[in-house]
Amino acid sequence: MLAVTDEAALAAILAHEDAHLRNRDTNGSLNLAELEKCFELIFDYAPPGRTVSGSLFYWMLSPLSKTLGREEIRLSRHAEIEADRHAARTGDSYSTARALLLAGAAGVLFEDRAYRPLRRELLGSMAPPEPPLARTLKAALGLSDPDTLREYVQKAWDAPDDTTSDHPPWPERLAALGYSSPPTIEPVEHPALSTLLRSETVAERVRHFNDEWTSTVADHLDR
């Protein structure tokens, strides 16, 4: 996130996260989580498949679990919208919309230029390929180009709604801020990664995570 935002966009994202903290007791998701914990406690004492009572209770709860899952997604999506609105009230709608679209564009860009190629290279690989963090940091540079940013903002906007996701689609989130189409946003000139952290710290952390990933994959390939 630090690599694809600047300080202004990061401030909007932090305002969004602040809203989640403020609303943690009011969006209902904690109540559902407590209810699910009660079910887990029951199954600890009466495991389905090993006890008659546990199997019967599991069979009875199966339709309810689907309903709870849908309700949890609905509540989570509502919480995201409310957090976006809070961020807009804290700053302004454009800054919040820009931060959201930078995140959305980055997600699609990373899938296109980092994650999908990485998955393809891992198939039948004899040696660890370039680590994912190194790839995403390279890909993030593309968002400084206005044409690339515009392309991937549109791709994020046009992406179909994943009904299993606990986050609403980008058009729905932007509509809550007053936008019916993706606004033209300014590209990131100075990423927060370079303005908020010392370059030595960034280099050390990137090297650490790259080495850790490469070592894990090398061990897996050696088996």
Image (spheres, rainbow, N blue to C red):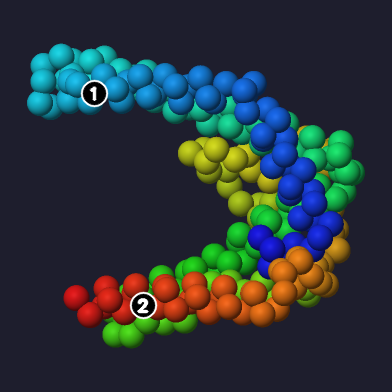
Which residue is more in the foreground, 220 or 187? Answer: 220
Image coords of residue 153 (percent x, y): 72, 59
Residue at the image point whose x is 67% and y is 34% from the top: 21
Q: Which disc is residue 108 wearing? A: none
Distance from the alpha carbon under mark 2 to that under mark 1: 38 Å
Q: Could you tell me if residue 121 is visible in this image?
A: no
Q: Amino acid at mark 2?
A: Ser
| 152 over 214 or under it: above or below | above
113 vs 87, left or right, is: left
Circle 1 residue? 43
> Residue at position x 27%, y 73% from top?
220
Q: Quadrant of the N terminus?
A: bottom right
Residue 205 in which image quadrant: bottom right
Element type where label 1 sits in the image? helix
Residue 41 lies in what quarter of the image? Answer: top left
| 152 and 97: which is toward the camera | 97
Drawn side of residue 202 relative to residue 14, left or right: left
Q: Disc 2 on helix, strand or loop?
A: helix
Marks 2 and 1, the one that precedes in the sequence: 1
Can you identify the residue that label 2 sits on?
Answer: 215
Please tell me how many numbered marks the rendered image carries. Answer: 2
The answer to whether 175 is drawn above or below residue 70 in the figure is below
